[in-house]
Image: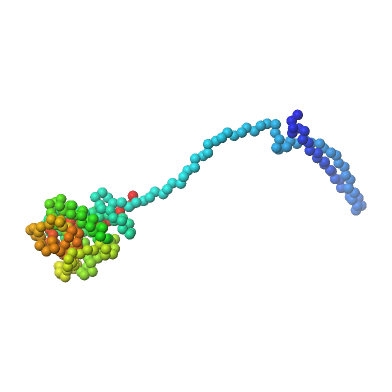
Amino acid sequence: MSKCDTMKKIVKVIEFDDDVVEGRSSIGRKGHELRSSSSSASCSSEEQPRRGNRRPFPVRRPQRPTEIKETCDDGWLEFKRPNGVWCILVGYSGVSNGWYSQQDAQNACTGMGAVLTGFQNENERMTVAEEALKKTTAVGRTVAGLCNCGPYNTFQWTDGDTMGIEGFKWGICEPDNTNWPGATACIQQFIMAPNFVPGPGDSVNWKPAFVNGDLDKYQCNSQVHPWTRFYICGKRGVRR
């Protein structure tokens, strides 16, 4: 006999009969004892099988959100500006006779989804000047010009992104008081090698007035000097 069979519970059941006679009630009681057995819920003659050790489920770490970066296309210089990445391309027009206007340069930039760019600071101005000098010497020249445009006497960058005046560094006596033809005057950047020697179409005044990267006020229309013409386009970085 198991341990649980020896456990008994005595239950006394009492039955009540209510009789009402002439307004008085008499309660008869009769009862008997019942012996009943019940198994305790905690008792069992069977052993519960133990669950074996299971490997815990792997905890998945939350994935980091993909970082979106702004980058420049191949061949474009990349600069960090307060409002994001700015990309600049130094392009050679193929023109070496001066017949290349500010509007021609703007059209070249528009065709690439860009605008003629200004310089946010000294770093941009000189990085572009050094890149342009490499391309100038590569075509056998020692002097060239790049451009941007603004109103008379209140020169400002017109690309819609460049801010402030940190990118300005004029040559000696620039901007001058020359009244160039047209409603506005333009800005060009002098690209000049250290070994520059004036040749046909060049001015002997350039050497003492400018060093590589200096800015110069000039006319927006053709024909312009120096005759070798470059353009500089700018646009926002591409989100990838």
Q: In which quarter of the image is residue 219?
A: bottom left
Above or below 36: residue 231? below
**Residue 143 position in % (x across, y down):** 14, 57
- For residue 78, side relative to residue 219 (left or right): right
| Residue at 66%, 32% in the rendered image | 47
Residues 197 and 6: in front is 197
- For residue 240, side relative to residue 29 (left or right): left
**Residue 155 position in % (x across, y down):** 23, 67
Total labels: the figure holds: 0
Q: Quadrant of residue 106?
A: bottom left
The colour scheme used to paint the residues is rainbow
| Residue at 29%, 63% in the rendered image | 163
**Residue 217 position in % (x across, y down):** 18, 65
| Residue at 25%, 60% in the rendered image | 122
**Residue 236 position in % (x across, y down):** 29, 56
Residues 239 and 193: in front is 193
Q: Residue furthest right?
A: 22
Does residue 10 appear in this view?
A: yes
Quarter the N terminus occupies? top right
Residues 39 and 13: in front is 39
Q: Residue furthest left?
A: 200
Does residue 104 appear in this view?
A: no
